[in-house]
Amino acid sequence: MIYEYHIRTEEEGFYNITPRVREALSKSGLKNGAALVYCPHTTAGMTINENADPDVVSDLLFALKKTFPDRPEFRHAEGNTTAHLKALATGSSVTVPVENGALTLGMWQGIYFCEYDGPRSRTFYVKLLSE
Ligand code: ZN
């Protein structure tokens, strides 16, 4: 089963989509397998990170900005190469094992849609895989 979700993002930020993944899992009735959460964009990504202290996300965004500064040597005409690089760093999908109908996330983990080139209308998919 695959579930499609849409989000409207602001400029740059991490969006906690864990409730939507749990919703898809609940709708599916899957008991054991995995949830594949996929971002079909080249200037946005998907990751798992801390969901307790919002300063962590803020620090991650700050560090990504410092790690991938805009460079005059970049040739991409759209002018958003830094967003492509940040997407490269976080990747396009995460996979979380499902056991007894629940995501096996750690207590402090959340699933984040990572926007690097907003504001935009974005899509992500949750594919539930049976074992
Ligand atoms: Zn581009």
Image (cartoon, rainbow, N blue to C red):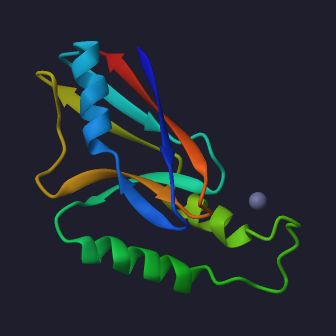
- Residue 106 drawn at (x, y percent): 15, 50
Residue placed at 40% from the left, 32% from the top?
A: 36
Left or right: where does residue 80 sit relative to residue 105?
right
Given residues 122 and 28, the one toward you in this image is 122
User: In the rendered image of this protein, does residue 76 appear above or below residue 101?
Assistant: below
Residue drawn where x is 19% and y is 44% of the image: 105
Residue 71 position within the rendered picture, expressed as x and y whole percent measured from the top left: 76, 85
Q: Residue at x 27, y 17 (%)?
A: 27
Q: Quadrant of residue 31?
A: top left
Question: What quarter of the picture does the C terminus occupy?
Answer: top left
How many numbered badges does the structure rendering display?
0
Which of 33/7 is in front? Answer: 7
Quarter of the picture holding the N terminus: top left
104 up-or-down from 118: above or below: above
Q: Quadrant of ligand 1?
A: bottom right
Q: Considering only vertical position in the picture, is 98 above or below 59?
A: above
User: In x, y percent, where is residue 120?
Assistant: 61, 53
Q: Is residue 124 above or below residue 59?
A: above
Residue 95: quadrant of the picture: top left
